[in-house]
Image (cartoon, rainbow, N blue to C red):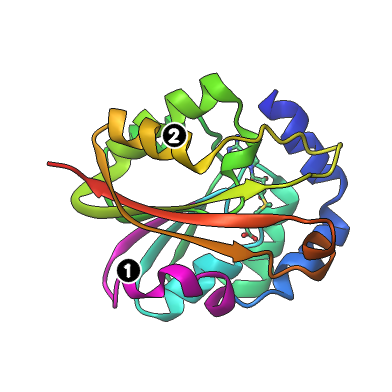
């Protein structure tokens, strides 16, 4: 299934690159800005798209691993944002085999607009993967999508409560939840809204 989603993104990449780059990372992350590291943190942005947010985190003095399975997005990210403070990796949820093989843990793990592309079983595996990648004092920040998605990029809607329970089952406790409208006008018009969740290891 993830190959189908990834092919859908690759096919639409020329339109999506412009769209993603037009968004403001500060606006997008405003619900959780108080939880972001100040500097010198190890950050992994999973499903990084064109690296807009990876570049924003890197500009704040962090070291960012941008994980993105779509080659067109990685290439656009490298050419638009350079590589200072950003390393790109081709890897895929739920297993993130290459990221795990590095044996690193991160102060911040972000998934912006990615969780909806995982079905129930993939989300179950992915939450364990996220736990393995999070430092004891680290945080996971992810957005849960509510509302329709493009048919060519399949979405598997889940609830905020289910995501919080799954996180709890995998050794996380909830730090923050906040509902937001979509910052993309076309998604807002289609009734898409988001819940931002932040977790930290429970000990
Ligand atoms: C809606 S876009 C969001 C991109 C970026 N995070 C942003 O906010 O602009 C979803 C991203 O998730 C990636 N993606 C989809 N399925 C994935 C998976 N199984 N593993 C990792 N990334 C995935 C897509 O390639 C795409 O870049």
**Which image quadrant: the C terminus?**
top left
Q: Position of residue 43 (x, y in %)?
A: 37, 59
Judge whether 86 appears above or below 169 on screen. below
Farthest residue toward the top?
A: 121
**Which image quadrant: the N terminus?**
top right
Classify residue 35 by image quadrant.
bottom left
Decide if residue 58 is on the left or right side of residue 114: left
Between 8 and 140, which is closer to the camera in this rendering? 140
Disc number at residue 98? 2
Decide if residue 97 is on the left or right side of residue 155: left
Neighbour tally class for label 2: few under 14, some 14-19, many 20 plus, Cα within 10 Å: few
Residue drawn 73% across the image and 47% down it = 147
Query: Does residue 67 appear anywhere in the picture?
Result: no
Residue drawn 68% across the image and 64% down it = 182
Residue drawn 40% across the image and 74% down it = 33
Neighbour tally class for label 1: few under 14, some 14-19, many 20 plus, Cα within 10 Å: some
Disc number at residue 201? none
Judge whether 179 appears above or below 132 on screen. below
Q: Position of residue 59 (x, y in %)?
A: 45, 80
Residue identified by numbered label 1: 35
Decide if residue 195 is on the left or right side of residue 145: left
Judge whether 43 appears above or below 183 on screen. above
Farthest residue toward the left?
A: 203
Label 1: state its secondary structure. helix
Between 31 and 60, which is closer to the camera in this rendering? 31
Label 2: state its secondary structure. helix
Residue drawn 84% across the image and 56% down it = 190
Q: Position of residue 50 (x, y in %)?
A: 66, 61
Of the numbered discs 2 and 1, the one sitting upstream in the chain is 1
Give the magenta part as a residue range: 25-45
């Amino acid at each position: 299934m993830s190959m189908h989603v990834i092919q859908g993104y690759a096919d639409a990449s020329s339109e999506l690159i412009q769209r993603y780059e037009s968004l403001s990372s500060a606006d997008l992350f405003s619900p959780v800005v108080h939880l972001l590291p100040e500097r010198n943190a190890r950050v992994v942005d999973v499903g990084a798209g064109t690296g807009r947010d990876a570049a924003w985190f890197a500009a704040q003095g962090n070291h960012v691993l941008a994980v993105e399975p779509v080659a067109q997005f990685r290439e656009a990210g490298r050419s638009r944002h350079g590589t200072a403070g950003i390393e790109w990796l081709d890897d895929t949820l739920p297993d993130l085999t290459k990221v795990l093989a590095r044996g690193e843990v991160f102060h911040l793990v972000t998934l912006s607009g990615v969780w909806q592309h995982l079905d129930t079983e993939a989300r179950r595996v992915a939450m364990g993967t996220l736990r393995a990648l999070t430092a004891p004092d680290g945080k996971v920040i992810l957005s849960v999508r509510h509302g329709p998605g493009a048919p060519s990029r399949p979405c598997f809607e889940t609830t905020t409560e289910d995501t919080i329970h799954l996180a709890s089952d995998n050794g996380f406790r909830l730090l923050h939840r906040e509902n937001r409208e979509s910052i993309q006008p076309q998604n807002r018009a289609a009734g898409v809204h988001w819940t931002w969740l932040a977790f930290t290891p429970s000990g």
